[in-house]
Amino acid sequence: MADAHPGAGRVFLALLLFLLLAAPLAYFAWGGLSHLLAGQWNPGEFALGAGSVVVFAVLASLFKRWLDTLPTD
Protein backbone atom coordinates (compact mmCIF):
# COMPACT_ATOMS: atom_id res chain seq x y z
CA MET A 1 0.00 0.00 0.00
CA ALA A 2 1.30 3.45 -0.88
CA ASP A 3 2.08 5.83 1.94
CA ALA A 4 -0.62 8.53 2.11
CA HIS A 5 1.56 10.96 4.06
CA PRO A 6 2.94 13.98 2.19
CA GLY A 7 6.67 14.22 2.05
CA ALA A 8 8.52 16.40 4.50
CA GLY A 9 9.70 18.54 1.60
CA ARG A 10 6.13 19.32 0.54
CA VAL A 11 5.10 20.32 4.06
CA PHE A 12 8.27 22.39 4.46
CA LEU A 13 7.65 24.22 1.18
CA ALA A 14 4.04 24.95 2.13
CA LEU A 15 5.12 26.34 5.50
CA LEU A 16 7.90 28.37 3.89
CA LEU A 17 5.48 29.84 1.35
CA PHE A 18 3.02 30.72 4.11
CA LEU A 19 5.71 32.42 6.18
CA LEU A 20 7.13 34.33 3.21
CA LEU A 21 3.67 35.68 2.39
CA ALA A 22 2.50 36.23 5.98
CA ALA A 23 5.59 38.03 7.33
CA PRO A 24 5.19 41.22 5.25
CA LEU A 25 1.46 41.25 5.98
CA ALA A 26 2.14 41.07 9.71
CA TYR A 27 4.74 43.83 9.37
CA PHE A 28 2.30 46.24 7.70
CA ALA A 29 -0.52 45.37 10.09
CA TRP A 30 1.75 45.86 13.11
CA GLY A 31 3.08 49.18 11.81
CA GLY A 32 -0.39 50.52 11.10
CA LEU A 33 -1.66 49.50 14.52
CA SER A 34 1.41 50.91 16.24
CA HIS A 35 1.02 54.33 14.63
CA LEU A 36 -2.72 54.33 15.25
CA LEU A 37 -2.24 53.60 18.96
CA ALA A 38 0.43 56.30 19.15
CA GLY A 39 -2.15 58.81 17.92
CA GLN A 40 -0.66 59.33 14.47
CA TRP A 41 -3.64 59.06 12.10
CA ASN A 42 -2.67 58.41 8.51
CA PRO A 43 -5.59 57.09 6.42
CA GLY A 44 -3.34 55.49 3.80
CA GLU A 45 -1.29 53.65 6.37
CA PHE A 46 -4.43 52.59 8.23
CA ALA A 47 -5.95 51.23 5.01
CA LEU A 48 -2.75 49.31 4.24
CA GLY A 49 -2.70 47.84 7.74
CA ALA A 50 -6.39 46.90 7.68
CA GLY A 51 -6.03 45.35 4.25
CA SER A 52 -3.03 43.39 5.47
CA VAL A 53 -5.07 41.99 8.36
CA VAL A 54 -7.81 40.86 5.98
CA VAL A 55 -5.37 39.23 3.53
CA PHE A 56 -3.52 37.59 6.44
CA ALA A 57 -6.78 36.15 7.78
CA VAL A 58 -7.66 34.71 4.36
CA LEU A 59 -4.15 33.29 3.94
CA ALA A 60 -4.22 31.72 7.41
CA SER A 61 -7.64 30.23 6.69
CA LEU A 62 -6.43 28.69 3.45
CA PHE A 63 -3.32 27.31 5.16
CA LYS A 64 -5.44 25.81 7.96
CA ARG A 65 -7.77 24.24 5.41
CA TRP A 66 -4.76 22.65 3.69
CA LEU A 67 -3.40 21.40 7.02
CA ASP A 68 -6.77 19.82 7.82
CA THR A 69 -6.52 17.72 4.65
CA LEU A 70 -3.27 16.11 5.77
CA PRO A 71 -3.63 12.60 7.19
CA THR A 72 -3.10 12.08 10.91
CA ASP A 73 -1.92 9.01 12.77
Image (cartoon, rainbow, N blue to C red):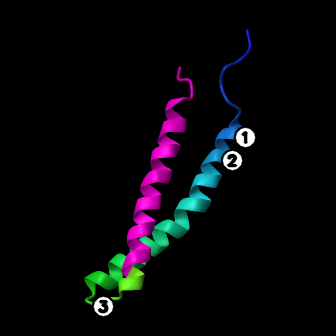
The first of marks 3 and 2 along the sequence is: 2
As helix, strand or loop, the secondary structure at mark 3 comes to loop
The first of marks 3 and 1 along the sequence is: 1
Marks 3 and 2: which is nearer the front? 3
Q: Amino acid at mark 1?
A: Gly
Marks 3 and 1: which is nearer the front? 3
Q: Which x, y percent locates residue 51?
A: 43, 68
Q: Dividing the image into 4 quarters, which one contains the N terminus? A: top right
From this view, report whether residue 37 is shown above or below residue 25: below
Q: Which x, y percent locates residue 7?
A: 71, 32
Quarter-of-image position of residue 47: bottom left
Calculate the distance from the C-alpha at mark 2 to the C-alpha at mark 1: 6 Å
Verify CB contact (< 8 Å) between mark 2 and mark 1: yes
Q: Which x, y percent locates residue 57?
A: 42, 54
Q: What is the span of residues highlighted in magenta in the rendered image?
A: 46-73
Q: Amino acid at mark 2?
A: Leu
Q: Residues within 10 Å of mark 2 (few under 14, many from 20)?
A: few
Q: Which x, y percent locates residue 27?
A: 48, 72
Within the magenta stretch, is there residue 45?
no
The mark found on residue 40 in the picture is 3
Quarter-of-image position of residue 12: top right
The mark found on residue 13 in the picture is 2
- Near-viewer residue (7 or 22): 22
| Predominant SS along the magenta part | helix
- Near-viewer residue (25 or 73): 25
Q: Amino acid at mark 3?
A: Gln
Q: Is residue 37 left or right of residue 13?
A: left
As helix, strand or loop, the secondary structure at mark 2 comes to helix
From this view, report whether residue 53 is shown above or below residue 46: above
Q: Which residue is mark 1?
A: 9
